[in-house]
Amino acid sequence: MRVWSIANQKGGVGKTTTAITLAGLLSMRGNSTLVVDMDPHGSLTTYAGYDPDNIEDSVYTLFHNPDVMIASVVKRTKFENLYILPASTAMATLDRQLGSRDGMGLILKRTFSRISSRFDHVLVDCPPMLGVLMVNALAACDHLIIPVQTEFLALKGLERMVHTLNMITRSMKIPIPFTIVPTMYDRRTRASQQSLQFLREQYPHMLSEALIPVDTQFREASRAGVPLPMMSPDGRGTLAYGALLDGLVEFDRALQYGQVKPHIRAAAS
């Protein structure tokens, strides 16, 4: 089982879109796929057809009862091979309730160890703020995906995210491979072109070659509650995420077989 976390400390950069689109592609390729909604806003949970305001068992349940039966927390979606561990709005209180307790940063990692034989891939959609939820997602992942909107304000969010990753890496003493994904790219605008050039200069070994374009079909897919690849298999956004997925799978395979070293894409220790 491979665990990919999708995180950025800036909102609105395409984290949930990245999580659900990659999950849709993986499930369509026959992989048993779990998406985990770690954001109290519950956008991914709503996307999957559940209500984060009224759901009974969720990520919140795991933090209060880590030994809960996984079958009661993991929910089916209406799509083959695709499951969700949903969010509830009550998760917003976890830092205040449990953030200072020992072991709270490893709840998700321990949960994944209990379901490692059930799923091929797990994708974790993170909140945009640093706290116990994001720490759990980083501690549990094999590979971090950082979507970055190609505009200058979003680049500051990337700097904060890389700083956070450095802190987690020093704490864990294990480098976390990461890939930066340029999102909402519009080649017609100077801002997009200059932002992409900055990313290529500053993060040459961590930057995905796949560019996620501005595509209104993402909004249409969200409104319909259907992953874009299932609604528009040949759409621009689907093809871009397909190229991203191929690159991620290839990198992870090389990493597993020792053909590349984690520090090539890892934050400095």
Image: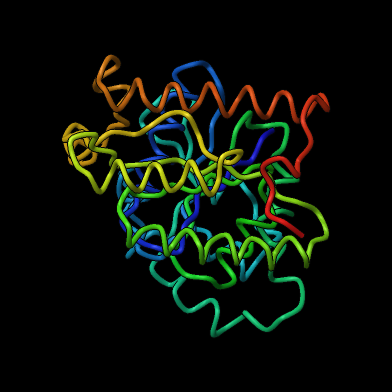
Residue 259 sits in which quadrant? top right
Residue 135 locus on image (x, y percent): 62, 65
Residue occupying image coordinates x 74% and y 54% = 110
Q: Is 176 in front, or is 27?
A: 176
Residue 267 sits in which quadrant? bottom right
Q: Is 199 in front, or is 54?
A: 199
Residue occupying image coordinates x 60% and y 66% = 164
Residue 51 locus on image (x, y percent): 31, 56
96 over 215 or under it: above or below: below
Identify the image quadrant of the N terminus.
top right
Q: How is the image coloured?
A: rainbow
Residue 246 locus on image (x, y percent): 53, 21
Name the side, left or right, on which 260 lies relative to 84.
right
221 over 265 or under it: above or below: above
Q: Is 207 in front, or is 105?
A: 207
Q: Is 203 in front, or is 229?
A: 203
219 over 237 or under it: above or below: below
Residue occupying image coordinates x 58% and y 60% = 162
141 over 27 or under it: above or below: below
